[in-house]
Amino acid sequence: MFSEPYMQRALMITVLLAPLCALLGVFVTARRMSFFSDTVAHSALAGVAAGFWLGMPDPTWAMLAVSLLVAGLILWLKERTQLLTDTIMALLMSSFMALGIVGFSLLKGFRGELHRYLFGDILSVGGVDVGLAVAATVVVGGVMFRLLSSLTLLTVQEDLAHLGGHSVRGLNYLFVLLLTAVVALSIRLLGIILVTSLLVIPPAAARNLAANFRQHVALSVLAGLVGGFGGVAASYQFDLPCGPTIVLACSALFLLSLPLASLRKARVPRT
Amino acid sequence: MPAIQFHSGGLAIEVRGLKVTLGDTQVLRGVDFHVPKGQIVALIGPNGSGKTTLLRCLLGLHQPDAGEVRLFGQKHSAPVLQRVGYVPQRLALDRSFVLSVREFLCLKLATTRDWFWRRHASTDAVLKPVLEEFDVERLLDRPLAGLSGGQLQRVLIAFSLLGNPDLLLLDEPTAGVDTPGEHTFYELITQVHRRHQLTVVLVSHDLSMVFRHASRVYALNGVICCEGTPEEVMNADSLKQAYGIHVTPYHHDHAHGHRHVHVQ
């Protein structure tokens, strides 16, 4: 399966983005941001429509731009209004998704495309996507490596992070920026509807087994890598849709983590 | 309007004319108080009296509409805030975020901030003096979210003292701690105060702690409505100002031996 160029690209983007999502996911789950991820992902549909409207051969840049716009709007409305974040996100998610679908309906001959963006399409992964995935891994991976401690303290208690000399606002914005970019890029792989699963399932599986944060991060990245690679391989082997198969592979790891977690608990006496 | 004059000789905290409006409510209506260096003081007030807002202003987390806060004679800046230790009432984390006590403590020090790639032995050596002082060595591998109220409090105090602060601010320190735990806590604070020679500010709605442990008490209710020694502040008139009209403090001795003050 490695001989085919499209599979090489698919595997490349998977082994880069899946662990990256899993790493960010540790913080996404702890900070209850999975709905945020869903919102920026679903809004990217308007980006797809906009990309086609503008005659772009590949709408990746337009998706990225719209997701970042929506992330910015969430933060802006959160600061400027009395509305709950939950309300703001639901409002923007449905509005931008509706905008995307209306946009699609006005385009002639693109109906079939909708499915590819909703559920992911590994065949459509192009050189641009691979390049962006490499760039995201270098940049996001580098920033996360550098700021792991700051983000951890921020997640534990924002006031302690402030006293520790960290810019709380700056770190929050930076995390949102990195997360949005990675989510938008991962849509190619998993589709708008399923992309959040890569942020949630590997960290959840890892949490079942981890005794500390170091293990949580390491196991989550590992689960992302194994689930991503296993999913792509299984989809090739059994001719299954790639994105959903990756999700199922991650879910299988989660199921596996449950009995392993009880074994671990039984072995380690409670103190 | 004349410039505000500061006399910062021996003061840890100076607050002048602090005003904060949140929404339609003026939460702080001109708060003035100062805390001399090296004392244990209590800032008390009923719920909604502006304690949390004042605390946030002290920590530089909230910009007041008017007035000034100075710590050690200086305005807020990163070096000044480094001299402040803060023990929050609670942490944001729940059981989904599995951070061990060791990992948490390592976040405080620049030398151990890269804990992720370091061996435990090397970080533990740096943390050792504080670990011993607060008896948290045996908790090191426990997840932070699984500690009891008293254990978490010791860990939080250890965390703040790792930075060798000159000022320690504790927000509702006895919330979530049972009565024997409360007793141990105050003994611990007294020890910390003596050993580290720092200024301690206890922020609480709980009056009982004031009697035994604070050398000075400030009662807040939008403004500092009374201040003085615990005995001075505890007289009914000034407490009435702070806690509203229907307040009668009474003292009684608990079976476990220390005096409590309740507000009816």
Image (tube, helix red, strand yellow):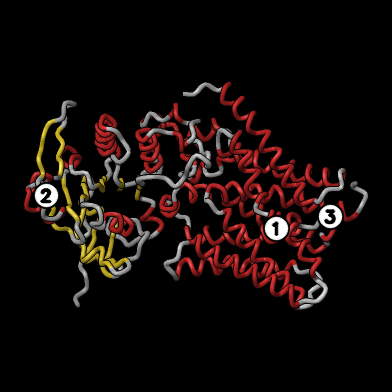
Quadrant housing the N terminus of chain B: bottom left
Q: Which residue is mark 1?
A: A136
In the image: residue A63, left or right of residue B153: right
- Residue at 36% in and 59% down: B60
Give the numbered dot on residue B183. Answer: none
Q: Does dot 1 land on a helix, a strand or a loop? A: helix
Q: Does dot 3 land on a helix, a strand or a loop? A: helix
Quadrant housing the C terminus of chain B: top left
- Residue at 28% in and 39% down: B174
In the rendered image, residue A174, in percent from the top left (x then y), is placed at: 57, 60
In the rendered image, residue B73, in percent from the top left (x then y), is placed at: 27, 59
- Residue at 65% in and 55% down: A140
Give the numbered dot on residue B247. Answer: 2
* Amino acid type for the residue under numbered disc 3: Arg
Question: Chain for mark 1?
Answer: A
In the rendered image, residue B170, in percent from the top left (x then y), is placed at: 30, 45
Mark 3 to mark 1 CA distance (whole Å): 15 Å
Give the numbered dot on residue A9. Answer: 3
Mark 2 to mark 1 CA distance (whole Å): 62 Å
In the rendered image, residue B94, in percent from the top left (x then y), is placed at: 47, 42
- Who comes first in sequence, dot 3 or dot 1? 3
* Amino acid type for the residue under numbered disc 1: Ala
Circle 2 crowding by C-alpha within 10 Å: few under 14, some 14–19, many from 20: some
In the image: residue B100, left or right of residue B72: right
Q: Does dot 2 land on a helix, a strand or a loop? A: loop
* Amino acid type for the residue under numbered disc 2: Val
Q: Would you identify the image quadrant in which residue A43 lies?
A: bottom right
State the residue in front, A31 or A253. A253
